[in-house]
Image: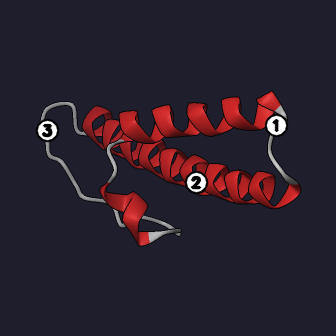
Amino acid sequence: MDNKLKDIPFEKAIEDLESVVKKLEEGNLSLDDSLKYFKKGIELYKHCNNTLENAEGKVKLILENENKVEEVQFKESE
């Protein structure tokens, strides 16, 4: 994953992904530009998916330790 993406907040990444999808759906791009947007979309999707998986892991830990709430930082998967 692109290292620049790891600093982008989840909400911004979702907005960017929606923008990429809209651009691709319009169908006005050249093949090369379509491939660039598609690649960017995949990178944004992976970033969002990793962020959600990390959040899910934190929620599971909190639920498992219902009497003892602690936050554990998960290593971002690539």
Location of mark 2 (residue): 46
Q: Identify which residue, 21 or 47, lies in the foreground.
A: 21
Residue at 70% x, 59% y is 36
The image shows residue 67 at horizontal and vertical percentages of 14, 32
Location of mark 1 (residue): 28
| 43 lies above or below 3 | above
Query: How many other residues sit within 10 Å of disc 1, few (<14), some (14-19) or many (≥20)?
Result: few
The image shows residue 45 at horizontal and vertical percentages of 60, 47
Q: In the image, which disc is placed on residue 69?
A: 3
Q: CA distance from mark 1 to mark 2?
A: 25 Å
Q: Is residue 57 left or right of residue 47?
A: left
Q: Three-letter amino acid code at disc 2?
A: Lys
Q: Identify which residue, 27 or 6, lies in the foreground.
A: 27
Q: In the image, which disc is placed on residue 51?
A: none
- Which circle's residue, 1 or 2, is located before the other in the chain? 1
| 33 lies above or below 23 | below
Residue at 34% x, 50% y is 8
At mark 2, the secondary structure is helix
At mark 3, the secondary structure is loop
